[in-house]
Amino acid sequence: MSKTLDRANAIAEESFIAASGPGGQNVNKVATAVQLRVNIYALGLSPRVFHRLKDAAGNRLNTAGEIVIDARNHRTQEANRREARERLAELIESALKEPKKRAKTRVNRVGKRKRLASKKAHGQKKALRGKVDL
C-alpha cells in the first residue's frame, strides 16, 4: 500500500497559485495555494483498484486522466502541500480497500406468507378506491 503512495508522490506535480481568504496583503503577493496533479495511468494499479479510484475521484479526475487536488485552506505553501498530499493518500487508500461483499438474505416461509398477505390487503384497499356503482 505504501508502495503505491510513494509512487504517487514521486509522479505528482505541484503548482502554486494565488489563494483567496485570510492572509491580509500577503495573500495578494504570495502564491500559497497548491494544485496537486497525479496521472492515474502512471500509478500502475490493478484494474479493480483503478476503477475504484476513478469512482472515488469523481469530478477531481479530468479528461487527461489526472486527479487534481486543490488545497488552499492554510496560509503557508508547506501546510497546503501537506494537506494536498494527505488528501491524495486518503483517496488512494480508500481505493485500495476491497469492499465487503453483500451477503444475500433468505426469507423463510412465514415471512413470505406475511409479505404476500400484506400485498393482497394493499391491493384490496386500492381496489376499493374506484368509482362507486349505484
Image (cartoon, grey):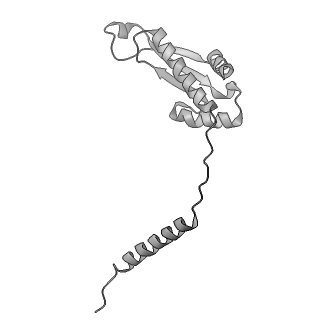
Q: Nearer the viewer, residue 108 or 29?
A: 108
> In the current view of this chain or complex, which residue is farthest to the front?
110
Provide residue 16's location: percent of width, then percent of height: 49, 13
Residue 16 seen in this snapshot = no
Provide residue 122's location: percent of width, then percent of height: 41, 72
Q: Tell me which corner region of the image, top left, top right, bottom left or bottom right, holds residue 30.
A: top left
Residue 5 seen in this snapshot = yes
Q: Quadrant of the N terminus?
A: top right
Write the residue at 54% across / 18% down.
85
Q: Tell me which corner region of the image, top left, top right, bottom left or bottom right, holds residue 29.
A: top left
Provide residue 61's location: percent of width, then percent of height: 56, 31
Placement of 131 over or under 87, stated as above or below: below
Provide residue 53's location: percent of width, then percent of height: 60, 33
Write the residue at 60% across / 47% down.
102
Left or right, 70 with respect to 103, comes to left
Left or right, 101 with respect to 33, comes to right
Write the residue at 42% across / 14% down.
18
Write the residue at 45% across / 75% down.
120
